[in-house]
Image (spheres, rainbow, N blue to C red):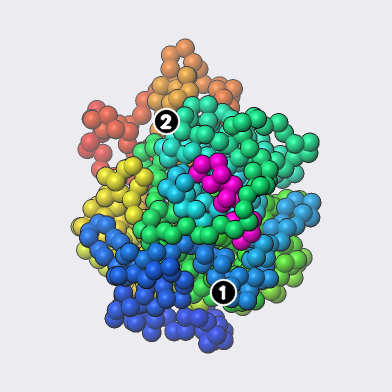
Amino acid sequence: MAENFDVKLVEEMKYYTPNPEYKRNSWLGDYQKAYDEFLADPDAFWSNVAHQLDWIKPWDAVKEWKYPYATWFTNAKLNITANCLDRHVNNNRRNKVALIWRGEGGAERIYSYQKLLSHVMRFANALKKIGVKKGDRVCIYMPLVPEQVIAMLACARIGATHSVVFGGFGAAALNLRIQDAEAKVVITADIAIRRGKAIQLKAIVDEAIMDAPSVEHVIVLRRKEPLVDIHPTRELDFYAVMEDVPEDCPPEVMDAEDPLFILYTSGSTGKPKGVVHTCGGYMVGTYYTSKYVFDIKDNDIFWCTADPGWITGHSYIIYGPLAVGATVFISELTPDFPDAGSWWSLIQEQKITVFYTAPTAIRMFMKMGEVWPNKYNLKSLRIIGSVGEPLNPEAFEWYYHTIGKDRCPIVDTWWQTETGMQMITTMIGEKMRPGFAGKPIPGVTVDVVDKSGKPVQPNTMGLLVIKSPWPAMLRTLYKDDERYRKYWYTIENCYTAGDLAVKGKDGYIMILGRSDDIIIVAGHNIGTAEVESALVSHKAVAEAAVIGKPDPLKGNSIKAFVILRVGHNPSENMTQDLLHHVRTTIGPIAMPQEIEYVDKLPKTRSGKIMRRVLKAKEMGMDPGDVSTLEE
Ligand code: WTA
């Protein structure tokens, strides 16, 4: 997003230096020393990390790189849940709290490592009982409750590949993901609870599976009293299915390269990409970053406010922190309900020490004023983090002063669904630079280059690339390896992230935004093509083009240009109808903020819509090269 590029801002060298105690006490120690150690021998570096974990059989090679395919921990055998659960239970930490959940109205549930393991094993046996086998795909469409965590870990326990779909997606989006993965089982709940209201999740599943022949069973967590009716054979109650199963479920022996999960993310076509992550490398990458980026210690209480339906939840609610043996806090409460103090009250109540959230939330809090956080005692906080979109300098300052009280280091972490683990940040103890995420994490090599792959000058905009494979990298796109190869062939020998960035003279990297047709709205990736195809599937729409517009709160907002079919006319009703249609097909996160009715869209002579021209016009900027424009 070139319109965010401000040379003055990039040239300003402003830093905050954390208290030296942070570095002295950190797992990492000195950043440069760690980074140099990695560069001197990358395989030895990752091997040292991997040796901190339990393996059923060790690897023959740390890494094998056959461009663009990598194998990590070749021929090693493991089970990630044995590292997230059994490892702690067997090391005198069975009574340590693994998970604390808070719902609305003061509801609270606490799981020790032992209790979590017991639930996971029972649910894993239940899945086996209904015929789920290693390699089968299981779709999880649930609210943020402990059962979601249990369901994911239970799949991993038996080697089933989970595909978690965020509970905010609509029926068509869910159907597409179930169909693409050919899920055998769907796990859901009757309702999600949001701002005091029940959201009927199961009704969406009912609609989504009407045309999904692969689905044999639906498991329903019934939260509401009286219990909702379920179909006597096809549908099963979450807890009833766990009765009459053995207590123990030994972890399935998984090859390091066996798939762990598929997670769909938006791409630049209408079809989402099924990012495939594998067991060994993903475990090592998320364990390592959880431990060293968040510097998690035994007494920490870690809260990542993401939903497990996104990669941030997979990596930093579940697999990473549990592999470290942390106490993880999760909550179904939104930041603004019952009032704008809800999250700060939870930090005070639970004595959260490490807090990880998104710039959108931070900017929303800024807008609501300091009175809210100032009502609560936030002294327990030790480290605060950010992810999902650029943390602009104003938001950085507010977060640093108002929440961190000039004391807590901020880890602004850049990464992606595809990278699986955090890649760029300012490691604990290093000086922080507002507006800049920081430097590559030891273990990762990045650069900012031009289209030919040549590094650009400092302080100039270029494309962000990753120059060598890393353990938690995606291995392919589910059933679409051709599309996977594009990541590595857009620029020869590099992984192209699809982000624009600037590297300062000090090596710090500022992320500017996407360089492709993905819009990041409130931290959620939305493909312009996805919204366009949802609009075009409405009977009144002939053509649609969608662009992202900078938004002070959400980072970007969606604007749609629509050509109606003959016989249909623009009206407020039409707009509401189209918005509703997008809401029920993709979900509320993809709803345009604005719809403008037009007679024509700018197109190339070959008929491709030039969104760039629409955007420039919208923003009052020069559209650049329009020589390919028709007429
Ligand atoms: C953006 C989320 C700036 C970026 C973990 C990336 C960021 C996309 C940051 C991936 C950050 C993520 N600063 N931009 N700290 N973190 N992004 O797959 O554009 O949901 O390509 O993964 O979010 O989004 P995804």
Q: Residue at x 66, y 47 (%)?
A: 244
The circle drawn on residue 569 is none
Total number of numbered discs in the rendering: 2
Q: Looking at the picture, tell me which residue is in the foreground, 67 or 9.
A: 67
Residue 619 seen anywhere in this rendered image of the structure: no
In front of the other: label 1 or label 2? 1
Question: In the image, what residue occupies the spot 63% across and 37% down?
Answer: 236
Asked whether, in this view, residue 414 is left or right of residue 322, the answer is: left
Looking at the rendered structure, the kind of residue marked 1 is: Ile
Residue 93 percent coordinates (x, y): 63, 74
Task: Give the prevailing secondary structure in the magenta stretch.
Answer: helix
- CA gap between label 1 and label 2 equals 43 Å
Q: Which residues are magenta?
A: 117-132
Provide the secondary structure element on which disc 2 rests.
Answer: helix
For marks 1 and 2, the one nearer the N-term is 1
Query: In which quarter of the view is residue 475 placed?
Result: bottom left
Does the beta carbon at disc 2 come under 8 Å from ligand 1? no
* Residue ID for mark 1: 296
Name the image quarter holding residue 417. bottom left
Point 51% across, 21% down: residue: 570
Amino acid on which disc 2 is placed: Ser
